[in-house]
Amino acid sequence: MENLGTVLRIVAAKQTLPGALLPILHEIQEELGHIPPESVSLIAKELNLSRAEVHGVITYYHHFRQTPPGRHVVRVCCAEACQAVGGEALAEHARARLEGSDLTLEPVYCLGLCAIGPALQIDETTLRARVTPEKFDALIDALEAGQ
Ligand code: FES
């Protein structure tokens, strides 16, 4: 319910903006870490949209999460330049390595490190280039050890 109060405040502040849905969803995720599924009806009602429309936008953009993130969010670049230098194998390796862990894996489409891919980002702060599966494991070992 506390979440719904936050959602309502954000919707009220932004609902008159043109194309208000996206900025509202971004701010909800920034504040709550995800878009709570129970907020979809509320957002739809306030913006005069159908629940399906709101849900469609949330699921269309990879950026939006419907469940709270893990302890850390690991984003592997899935854009073309990284894919061409091993990004796909890295993403596959990451999926297997992080399955069942409390870290969240998300795709991202370009981190601006295209010439030195494959690239990844950990939380909002750490960027890494030329990431091999071995380097990936070392990074994750460090994260899991709380470093
Ligand atoms: S394509 Fe991966 S960083 Fe640009």
Image (cartoon, rainbow, N blue to C red):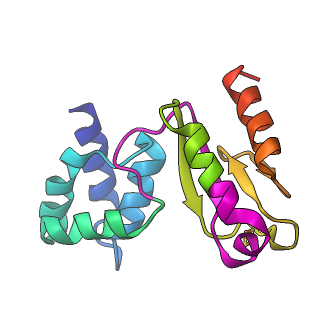
x, y percentage for residue 128? 81, 51
**For residue 135, above or below residue 24:** above
- Quarter of the image that includes the C terminus: top right
Q: Nearer the viewer, residue 4 or 101?
A: 101
Q: Nearer the viewer, residue 49 or 61?
A: 61
x, y percentage for residue 136? 75, 43
Q: Nearer the viewer, residue 139 or 34?
A: 139
Q: Magenta stretch: give its range.
A: 64-91
Q: Residue at x 63, y 47 (%)?
A: 94
Q: Residue at x 40, y 38 (%)?
A: 68
x, y percentage for residue 39? 22, 49
- Quarter of the image that includes the N terminus: top left
Q: Residue at x 64, y 49 (%)?
A: 93
Q: Which image quarter has ligand 1?
A: bottom right
Q: Residue furthest top?
A: 145
x, y percentage for residue 129? 84, 57
Q: Nearer the viewer, residue 100 or 40?
A: 100
Q: Residue at x 33, y 58 (%)?
A: 13
Q: Quadrant of residue 87?
A: bottom right
Q: How many marks?
A: 0
**For residue 63, above or below residue 141:** below
Q: Magenta span has 55?
A: no
Q: Magenta span has 88?
A: yes
